[in-house]
């Protein structure tokens, strides 16, 4: 069962107090850089992605420059990110589409972003909420786990979790809420051993009360 909207707002406020600096942990200076970094971040840590993009973006930080790389050259840059062949292929293909169809700028809607190779709903939501000022909640593994443990959501998949979070929190909480839940998941509500004794949300948490079904 989901918690009440009133409790969900209290949870949001406590998270804001606990993590006043919650923000994207990927390094970027332009929307295009965030798009590339987010594609690379699938099944990879932000720390690793930041190391890779620091070198890549020195010379290839626009779609115009990126498409001058061959598939092999691109793979050399991103090989430590995992699934690197696909990621290299998708970034090159997405960059060509951005040049051909979008005049060199990333699409400015979630639907438009999702037409790019390698960009699913989660990636589109990350980019939209961080650089396009479109309220969105990207549900990654941390957001899914933490929101279902807490009872902010009560869902078996990410799509339903996203819908439930958008329903229980007002729109102006969505984008920041995504970062807050990731900060909680990375620092306290860890996958294997949640540090409940350090958590400020025990009063509201379904898992802590022993009611969680999703783990
Ligand atoms: S009380 Fe424990 S399970 Fe609940 S959100 Fe906090 S760390 Fe996670």
Image: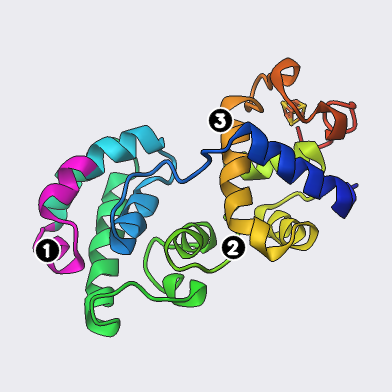
Q: Is residue 188 left or right of residue 71?
A: right
Sequence-first disc among 2 and 1:
1
Q: Residue at image x 44%, y 61%?
A: 127
Q: Residue furthest top?
A: 197
What span is in magenta? 54-70
Q: Is residue 152 visible?
A: no
Q: Residue at x 22, y 77 (%)?
A: 99
Per the rendering, the mark at residue 116 is: none
In front of the other: 105 or 68: 105
Judging depth in this view, the residue of 191 and 179 nearest the camera is 179
Q: Which residue is mark 2?
A: 136
Locate residue 161, reporting x and y percent: 72, 54
55 drawn magenta: yes
Q: Of the residues under marks 3 and 1, which one precedes in the sequence?
A: 1
The disc placed on residue 186 is 3
Residue 182: % across, % down: 58, 40
Q: Classify 46 as above or below 28.
A: above
- The residue singled out by tag 1 in the image is 65
44 relative to 54 in the view: left or right: right
Give the image location of residue 77, x and y in percent.
Answer: 17, 44
Quadrant of ligand 1 in image: top right
């Amino acid at each position: 069962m989901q918690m009440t909207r009133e409790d969900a707002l209290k949870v949001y406020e406590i998270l804001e107090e606990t993590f006043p600096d919650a923000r994207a942990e990927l390094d970027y200076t332009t929307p295009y850089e965030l798009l590339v970094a987010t594609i690379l971040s699938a099944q990879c840590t932000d720390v690793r992605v930041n190391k890779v993009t620091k070198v890549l973006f020195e010379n290839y930080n626009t779609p115009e420059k990126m498409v001058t790389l061959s598939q092999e050259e691109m793979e050399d840059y991103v090989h430590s990110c995992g699934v690197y062949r696909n990621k290299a292929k998708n970034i090159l293909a997405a960059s060509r589409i951005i040049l051909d169809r979008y005049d060199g700028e990333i699409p400015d809607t979630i639907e438009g972003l999702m037409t790019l190779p390698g960009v699913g709903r989660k990636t589109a939501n990350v980019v939209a909420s961080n650089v396009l000022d479109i309220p969105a909640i990207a549900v990654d593994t941390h957001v899914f786990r933490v929101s279902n443990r807490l009872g902010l959501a009560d869902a078996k998949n990410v799509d339903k979790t996203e819908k439930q979070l958008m329903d229980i929190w007002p729109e102006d909480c969505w984008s920041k809420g995504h970062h807050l839940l990731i900060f909680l998941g990375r620092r306290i509500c860890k996958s294997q051993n949640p540090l409940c004794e350090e958590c400020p949300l025990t009063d509201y948490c379904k898992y802590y009360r022993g009611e969680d079904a999703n783990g």
